[in-house]
Amino acid sequence: MPESISEKILPFIQTAPMAAFDDETFNRLAVELFHHQFEKNAVYRGLCRQQKIAPARVTGWREIPAVTTSAFKEVPLACFPAHEAAAVFHTSGTTQQRAGKHYFRTLKYYRAAMLRSFAAYCLADFGSRIADCGLRIADKRRSEIPNPKSPIRMRMFLLGPTFELFQNSSLGYMFSGLRDEFGDEKSAVFFSPEKVNAEGLQKALDRASQENAPVFILGTALALLECVEIFQQHNRKFQLPSGSRILDTGGYKGRRLEVTREEFQNWLSETFGLPREYLLNEYGMTELSSQFYASSLPDIPLRKERPTGSSHVLRFTPYVSHFLPPWVRVVAVDPEHLEILPAGELGLLRIFDLANVDSVMAIQTEDLGRAWQNRLELIGRAAGAELRGCSLLTETIAHAA
């Protein structure tokens, strides 16, 4: 029996070199995955037919039709009956907005991508100890986990949703999964639907400092800002043990003020006593299965593009971008006509994520940015006037359902 596309993608996510881009393999897998999704996803097939695009005409990944993030609010975009989903992640929004829904037949691709990227970009300074990280896979029932434990165990403190309390949150699944894989027995959660537990975090940080145990704080930007404000009110600063780090998930609009990325990092550095290279950022979305990290830790597997398109590993570069794992490609498109722009030009980001096996791999975002082979630069959310192309595409998808 021929090997299915899903059986090919998982090993690629688990083993593809993080510091090199295999364009030939990516293109082959992407085109094959498009064939699978065209056949199995009726709504997506309808969109492709309206655009007069058939699998026989698609020879490269850039030609694969994308769906908008807004389309996830309109119809189930799944290659299987929606009621058979092992998990359904909802987008966040106001009570007046409909939530988008991403249906997963299994979470094993999501988990494999999540662990591999996190180990490579957020724990790179652990060196050879990350060699076998990111290879454990599991679905929601956790019945598929082989048991060697991760060789890395840090004291992880969560300032964001957990899967135990937020079953429909992709961020909650990520935070819980990273804690379970990489956290030690003293890892803890200081976040609930009601509040951020800044007092509990303070005590835990004091304890870790007394024990000289490096900590990893993972949180939403708003939760981190709230803690920083509380600590500032009490004139409280920390000098966390060497090797400690903070990961935030973006969004710098506070309840009383808006801060820039630069200001936010300055506050974190001053409050927690950390050098800037240990302040990391994650960019992801419910409609994807992969995450992207802005990191300048020593030894992260960065690729520097040469004019020929070949690449080599850089050992240390201060980050200005989010780095792409080898199973993802990103382009920028013209906001009005959604045509692909040359590398480095400003446009709406379109993401091709092989880990989106059972939904749609090509996602048209509403985020402005620039894209290259190995990285993206996120500028921010596009204004309404810049989203005309996305709105028309979403309308087309709704009619295709």
Image (cartoon, helix red, strand yellow):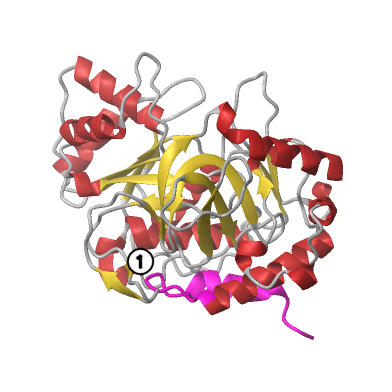
Which residue sits at x=50%, y=45%?
347
Q: Quick check: can you spot residue 401?
A: no
Q: Quadrant of the image for the N terminus?
A: bottom right
Where residue 183 appears, x then y in whole percent? 38, 52
Q: Secondary structure at mark 1?
A: loop
Asked whether residue 18 is drawn in magenta, I would say: yes
Which residue sits at x=63%, y=56%?
107
Q: Quick check: can you spot residue 159?
A: yes
Figure check: 51 above or below 261: below
Report the amino acid beneath label 1. Answer: Pro
Figure check: 208 above or below 105: above
Does 33 sit left or right of 22 as displayed?
right
Where residue 359 appears, x then y in whole percent? 71, 54
Does 176 sit left or right of 294 as displayed?
right
Asked whether residue 343 is drawn in magenta, I would say: no
The residue lying toward the viewer, choosing from 192 and 366, is 366
Report the span colored magenta.
1-23
Does 376 sit left or right of 28 as displayed?
left
Which residue sits at x=26%, y=54%?
296
Where residue 269 appears, x then y in whole percent? 19, 36
Q: Residue beneath label 1, please?
A: 151
Q: Quadrant of the image for the C terminus?
A: top right
Figure check: 182 above or below 59: above
Does 78 sit left or right of 90 as displayed?
right
Figure check: 146 above or below 173: below
Which residue sits at x=68%, y=58%?
106
